[in-house]
Image (cartoon, coloured by chain):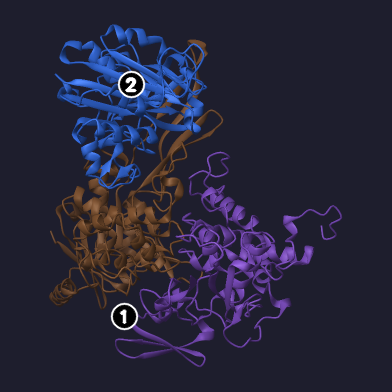
Amino acid sequence: MSRAIFIPRDGLHPVLDRLSAEMDVWVPVASGPQKCGGEFVRYVPGTVPVLERQSTTPPKRILLPQVESLLSYAYVKDPEDASRVKINLQAEIAAKPTVVFGARPCDVRGFLLFDRVFTGGPFQDEYYRKRRENTFFATLVCRQWDAACFCSSVGSGPADMEGSDLRLTPLEDGFLVEAINRRAHPILKLMGGEQPTKTQLEAAENLQKETTEEQVGTGDLTHSGDDFRGRFEDLEYWRSMVSQCISCGVCTFVCPTCYCFSITDEMQGLEGERLRSWDSCMFYQYTLEASGHNPRPSKFERYRNRIGHKFSFIPAKYAGMIGCCGCGRCIRSCPVSIDIRKVVENLKENACACS
Amino acid sequence: MHAHNPYLPELATVKEVIQETHNIRTLRIVLDDEEKMRRFVFRPGQVGQLSVFGVGESTFVINSPPSCKEYLQFSVMRAGEVTQRIHQLSAGDPIGVRAPLGNGFCFEELKGKDILFVGGGIGMAPLRTLLLHMIDHRADYGDIMIIYGARSPQDLCYRYEFDKWREGKVDLVLTVDSEFPGWKGRVGFVPTVLTEEAPSPHNRVAIVCGPPIMIKFVLFNLKELGFQSDQILTTLEKRMKCGIGICGRCNIGTNYVCVDGPVFSVAQLQGMVPEL
Amino acid sequence: MVIGWGTGYDPLHVTPVFLRGLEDVSRLIWNPLCVQNLTGYLVKGALTPPLEEGKKIGICVRGCDSRSLVALIQEKLLSRESLHIFGIPCRGTLDVRRLMNESGLSQIRSVTIQGDHLVVQNDEEAHRFPLERFLARRCLRCRHPNPVIYDELVYQPITPRTAPEDAYRDVEAMEARSLQERHLFWSSELDRCIRCYACRNACPLCICQDRCIAETREPRWLTQRVNLPEKFLYHFIHALHLAGRCTECGECERVCPMEIPVTLIKEKLNQITRDLLHYEAGLDPEALPPLLTYNPNEAGI
């Protein structure tokens, strides 16, 4: 069986139509009145994928929806004892086969962290695990990066296929799609497409090689844990770095590696649901305790925790893995243009503490 | 399938409610599944997430001893939304519970040692489970001393069983913040009483739980008495949601209070980032 | 301390700077890329360490920002005496996202203003962009380019580009559409909201900050769900709390990562405030905003 196909540029729709008839297919599309932004949506015939630029929001919500029901409950009268009320409890864990078509290496890298957090600890998050097992990533070899991108600085790169199942290499007249693991073979078969020519295969290989050698972002942010610990109590440092922060949740919501969530109950009448929803460590309420005590009362402690989590705590917990994929979304979407790279780079002792 | 879903609570029923103080109630709950109730095992110091469906979940230490197979006991101080609703529950009401969670006390390592419990207010709850476990296995432990204080005599929890504790050969020192008519115990803050009692640190482990300000001064005074930081254990509280080390909020640096705690030695805390 | 603008992660992106000493002054810049309204920093507990008693704080404001100051002074959230205001007549700021998107530029080395053009130098060559084409929507409808309150005016005052009667032409254009079209428009726009609350936190007049009713559990107006009704409700709570107070600085719209034109909702409320109550927010420090008072003989309603 062939392990690669070629999709001509005008042949993308038939391929996605075929795929989406069998499974959920998510693609990045342009959004917003000016069509500057982009987000991943469920493909239906007619959807126009935009593969030429990074989406504003990552494909995070495909595996970790912004809100989902963990369980539902209902208060019911006990049929054997009318004075008693019982609870009917239900938890449904379901996942459809899904393909994410056109994510970038940085987008997928977020899920490598999710895998460890949700399925690598003492407790398994079945909701995530089931979706993850049913999801395939067809990932682009990335050729578009801007001043906010820095995937090479966090140990990845624009052609990094770790965590992906299929590789999409953009060629002049279309895409070369290769299966990079066995589980991707049925997907490739379903896609159809053309047999690639030798020229196309060579062109793709050259582009992959060239892209692998690219250095996106300067510097190395992968060994910052000790520097972070050294700066932890240097409040003046955090003030000088993030006085601009307005404590909104943009950086966390557009981040492919931010997964922290809240759990809240909602009820109408005698029935309700327990919801899991994205939360943001930038919010005051995130760590606010019922007593009124808050271990991270100001934006400085909160931002410090964000940096610590990504560049110190996660690497310490997961064998050096950085909790940042270098996609640059937090920089690009930040209302006040805070640059996370600078905050991490300047952690090093003797670095100038002023921005 | 449900057995594997760590977010799914076990259904349980409130068996008994005890009004401890004006804002603390103790709930004794029984798992609806009799087999699970019989087979329920936990370590002293482990916690449970109590669910009031429609309101939410909160974390409380299981304060019954592991030997008690009839019910699980939780003491709840009224503070936020969930605790307010828990206080409205009465015997026969349904409740959900996810337990046991957290690390609990390494009581095996405490065998053969003298023990000092220092508790304040609701902070006696996590100490009670370990204390009762030690009384159950009294021969395994040396001298046991408890210094327990609250604002007033009416703010002391578990008053109805102090005599039983004493029967277990436990030196119980009670203190309240100021004089009250009829009060025969000590008067003064817990840290001061600790210094006055001056228990020897030799072969002893101190287990401290109470309000942050009390802990702060107790730790200071313990050091003055010669306790080393690996001789002092305490239990921490944080805002928690998942309780299983995933949702991300209860971390102190690399450690999650919900799975790596709530029990930490002071030596461990000193190795963590200072963010309590 | 003086709050102003400085260069951010590349020359197209500006970031607020907090000048603490003379040595910091060289970081200060002013150009059409200085997009942030800085006045929120004065009221949202953001200043650490807090100001010393009796010491003034300096702040750079454009016309629109100065109106935020007026509103904050009116509501006694700021005292005029504590401020030293550097007023800057402003010809408009750019929609940086649109500029980036349409130009496709990256690796930018420098940015200069030459007459009516922005000149962007990248690795290869210089690119010229007419400022007018990339002005933010808020600036295209600006009626107060000159600061209404200041201690020092940095440049000469300029003529407003929009006449008062044209102030709400975007609202009027929206209202010219059918009800069904409008419903469709707002449904599809607000559906993109990710509830990151950037619009709220960037707003200098959204002063509840950490006590916002959108996040409280008691009372619980909103759940964590991300469906359309919740998003609608959030944005209308936001807008209604600003009715007659909003100075239309447009920050809520600028900061929205999903590019939702949320200022339009506030513009509509301001249009109503103008027509019914003959009031325009943020112009007169002595005036009392109509919804902060009660007049049983109110003529407008």
Query: Mark 2 and mark 1 in contact (Cβ < 8 Å)?
Result: no
Residue A117 spot, x, y in % from top left: 26, 45
Colour blue maps to chain: B
Residue A43 appears in the picture as rendered: no
Residue A181 lies, with reference to residue A336, above or below; the image says: above
Residue visible at 46% across and 56% down in the picture = C196
Question: Of C178 and A156, which appears nearest the observer?
Answer: A156
Q: What chain does badge 2 belong to?
A: B
Residue visible at 14% across and 73% down in the picture = A209
Question: Of C116 and B229, which appears nearest the observer?
Answer: B229
Q: CA distance from mark 1 to mark 2?
A: 66 Å
Quadrant holding the N terminus of chain B: top left
Question: Of C244 and C153, which appears nearest the observer?
Answer: C153
Q: Residue furthest front?
A: B196
Q: Say what amino acid the circle numbered 1 marks.
A: Gln
Q: Say what amino acid the circle numbered 2 marks.
A: Ile
Residue B167 lies, with reference to residue C97, above or below; the image says: above
The residue carrying mark 1 is C107
Colour purple maps to chain: C
Residue A286 spot, x, y in % from top left: 42, 46
Between circles 1 and 2, the one closer to the viewer is 2
Quadrant holding the C terminus of chain B: top left
The residue carrying mark 2 is B147
Residue A194 spot, x, y in % from top left: 21, 68
Secondary structure of the residue carrying numbered label 1? loop
